[in-house]
Image (spheres, rainbow, N blue to C red):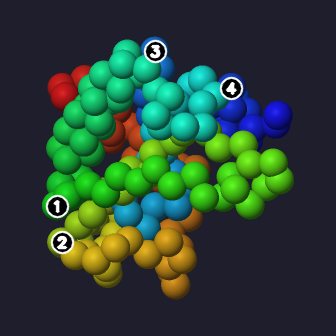
């Protein structure tokens, strides 16, 4: 079966970082500064089928990513979701485990001349925001660079 996420993993362009089992990409949409996808490198569509090594390594990825983003941008908390709903809009469905990582901010953040404001802080994140925040390739690279710089100390 065809899997868009497998293809994305194979053609990985500028990931934030990767481990043996997981790869972290910065999302194009940055309404939540530092928003990333943490994706299992192998194709698997069922969280219950992750093996112990993958779970253990995911814990390390979570710690590393949260520490680096906290140091880079100072979020107040982090939201993690693993939904895979869109995969079930296809027939047949072909889900691929990936986590949405969303730093949340109780305060505005200025980065590279841009101001990021989390208008929904304290509530569920807004999937369909009125003001999506696609950032340029240059800004995306600066965000990735800011996180990577802190990975070395995390």
- Asked whether 48 or 131 is in front, the reply is 48
Quadrant housing the C terminus = top left
- Circle 1 sits in a helix, a strand or a loop, which is it? loop
- Give whichever of discs 4 and 2 has the lower sequence position: 4
Q: Residue under circle 1?
A: 76
* Picture layout, residue 66 above or below residue 7: below
Whole-percent x and y of residue 84?
57, 52
Q: Residue at x 67, y 39 (%)?
A: 5
| Mark 4 vs mark 2, CA separation in Å | 36 Å
- Give whichever of discs 3 and 1 has the lower sequence position: 3
Category of crowding for the residue at label 2, using alpha-carbon neighbours closer than 10 angstroms: few (below 14), some (14–19), many (at least 20): some
- Give whichever of discs 3 and 4 has the lower sequence position: 4
Q: Residue under circle 2?
A: 106
Category of crowding for the residue at label 4, using alpha-carbon neighbours closer than 10 angstroms: few (below 14), some (14–19), many (at least 20): few
Q: Residue under circle 4?
A: 10
- Give whichever of discs 2 and 3 has the lower sequence position: 3
- Circle 4 sits in a helix, a strand or a loop, which is it? helix
| Mark 1 vs mark 4, CA separation in Å | 33 Å
- Circle 2 sits in a helix, a strand or a loop, which is it? loop
- Give whichever of discs 1 and 2 has the lower sequence position: 1
- Determine whether label 1 and label 2 are within 8 Å by CB: yes
* Left or right: 12 as drawn, with respect to 151: right
Q: Residue under circle 3?
A: 20
Category of crowding for the residue at label 3, using alpha-carbon neighbours closer than 10 angstroms: few (below 14), some (14–19), many (at least 20): few
| Mark 1 vs mark 2, CA separation in Å | 6 Å
* Picture layout, residue 77 above or below residue 122: above
Whole-percent x and y of residue 116?
34, 70
């Amino acid at each position: 079966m065809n899997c868009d996420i497998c293809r994305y993993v194979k053609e990985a362009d500028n990931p934030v970082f990767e481990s043996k089992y997981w790869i972290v990409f910065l999302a194009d949409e940055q309404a939540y500064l530092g928003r990333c996808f943490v994706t299992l490198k192998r194709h698997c569509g069922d969280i219950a089928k992750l093996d112990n090594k993958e779970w253990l390594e995911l814990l390390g990825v979570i710690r590393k990513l949260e520490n680096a983003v906290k140091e880079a941008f100072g979020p107040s908390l982090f939201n993690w979701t693993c939904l895979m709903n869109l995969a079930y809009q296809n027939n047949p469905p072909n889900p691929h485990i990936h986590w949405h990582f969303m730093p949340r901010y109780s305060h505005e953040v200025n980065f590279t001349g841009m101001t990021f404001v989390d208008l929904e802080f304290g509530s569920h994140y807004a999937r369909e925001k009125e003001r999506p925040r696609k950032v340029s390739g240059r800004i995306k690279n600066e965000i990735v660079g800011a996180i990577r710089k802190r990975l070395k100390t995390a």
